[in-house]
Image (cartoon, helix red, strand yellow):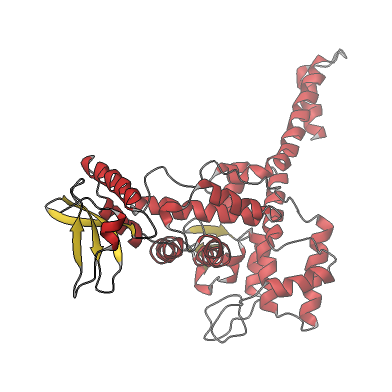
Amino acid sequence: MAKITKRSVDALAPKATDYFEWDSLIPGFGVRVSPKGRKTYTVQYRVGGRTKRVSLGVHGAITPDEARALARQTMGEVARGEDPAGQIERDRRAPTVSSLCDRFLDEYVASRCKATTARDYRAVCKNYIRPKLGMMRVQDVVRTDIADMHHKLRDKPYQANRVLAVISKMFSQAEVWGLRPDGSNPTRHVRKYAERKRERFLSHEEIKTLWNTLDHVVSLGEVTEHVAAAYRLLLLTGCRLSEIQTLKWSYVRGEVIWLPDAKTGPRRVMLAELARKVLSDLPRVEGNPYVIVGEVEGQHAINLQKPWRRIRKEAKLEDVRIHDLRHTYASFAAMAGHSLHMIGNLLGHTQAQTTARYAHLADAVTRRASDDVGALIGGFLADDGSSEDDAIVEFRRGS
């Protein structure tokens, strides 16, 4: 055993099998010589009763002095209780973001999310996360990677925020699965873009126009009566598109629709008289359990967006989305004086802030009530010799 130098390493000849030459100054530091003559600087140590080696570099690419410095650094890590070789192996086997996507979709999304949500998550993984981050190791992703990805989608703020939300959920699961340290989610402090909530509600006249247009396109054979009924029911129940699209006759129970698997869990939907009439006028198709019958035998209608584009163009309501029919239902409930809590019940909301967007419509009813009370008090204050009872009678006449 002698001090390793460039001259001594150059003089090492290959043998039939690998062999080591060890340094006399640093225990565990040596050179590994392969049968083909490849010479690799190595450091060897023991941890947990096992002998482990770490390759430091190939002779020629690094000098003996550089290898010796790396050996001292490695042995220092071992002295602090670390396992450099074990860490290298863990890093080599560390999952990529692409494999995390697979596990997230297979183990988390498949069992916890609705079919439509799962479809959206798969699309985000395929179109955004895998192309940008897929080859990176999960533990190597940092906030700047996410912020840069989010920034590049700034011209599509809604989509950018949806992508950010999926990444956040996925990396939260990575922490649960022990793939990243707790509290290391790289989406933290990446601010979402401001989103302007749409408030498009149909007026009385627009509802009449839409209703007549549905009659017209059905009479022309441009859409089926089942598809037209879907839009009518969306307007009359405030249900989500998927809830009406996949509605089965077995869910319709007199004046109530029982949805066993709505977005927020099982819920009941009350049917107004007109909604019940739409259902009663709709022919059932033998062998098909769905209300909104599709083109495929035994299945519901798959695409309601395409016929809707034709219908809204015919009705000159081209800025109205299908989801705005749900907003219209809620807006009329608010203008009828129903509380936000009641509107939330009608729509199947589980959080009050989701219904808060209709507060300004409910305010109109509250304002009228406030004006009535103010007028009554003003009547009491009027110095016209009338009694309090006279003021109340006059108020009741006016109301």
Where is residue 356 shown, x and y percent of the image? 63, 42
Q: In the figure, is residue 376 to the left or right of 166?
A: right
Q: In the figure, is residue 297 to the left or right of 234?
A: left
Q: Is residue 80 above or below residue 133?
A: above
Residue 388, quarter of picture: top right
Q: Is residue 369 above or below residue 109?
A: above
Q: Is residue 237 visible?
A: yes
Q: In the figure, is residue 235 to the left or right of 89?
A: right
Where is residue 355 shown, x and y percent of the image? 62, 45
Where is residue 194 shown, x and y percent of the image? 67, 45
Assign the C terminus to one quadrant of the image.
top right
Q: Nearer the viewer, residue 338 or 63?
A: 63
Residue ranking furthest to the left: 49
Instruction: Say which residue appears at 85% left-offset and 15% top-offset.
Output: 382
Residue ranking furthest to the right: 384
Count of marks, rendered view: 0
Q: Nearer the viewer, residue 302 or 394?
A: 302
Assign the N terminus to one quadrant of the image.
bottom left
Instruction: Say which residue appears at 73% left-offset and 79% top-offset.
Output: 223
Where is residue 299 shown, x and y percent of the image? 55, 81
Q: Is residue 349 visible?
A: no
Q: In the figure, is residue 162 to the left or right of 213?
A: left
Instruction: Say which residue appears at 24% left-offset and 45% top-offset.
Output: 75
Q: Nearer the viewer, residue 60 or 219?
A: 60
Instruction: Say which residue appears at 31% left-offset and 56% top-offset.
Output: 6
Residue 25, quarter of picture: top left
Q: Nearer the viewer, residue 178 or 94?
A: 94
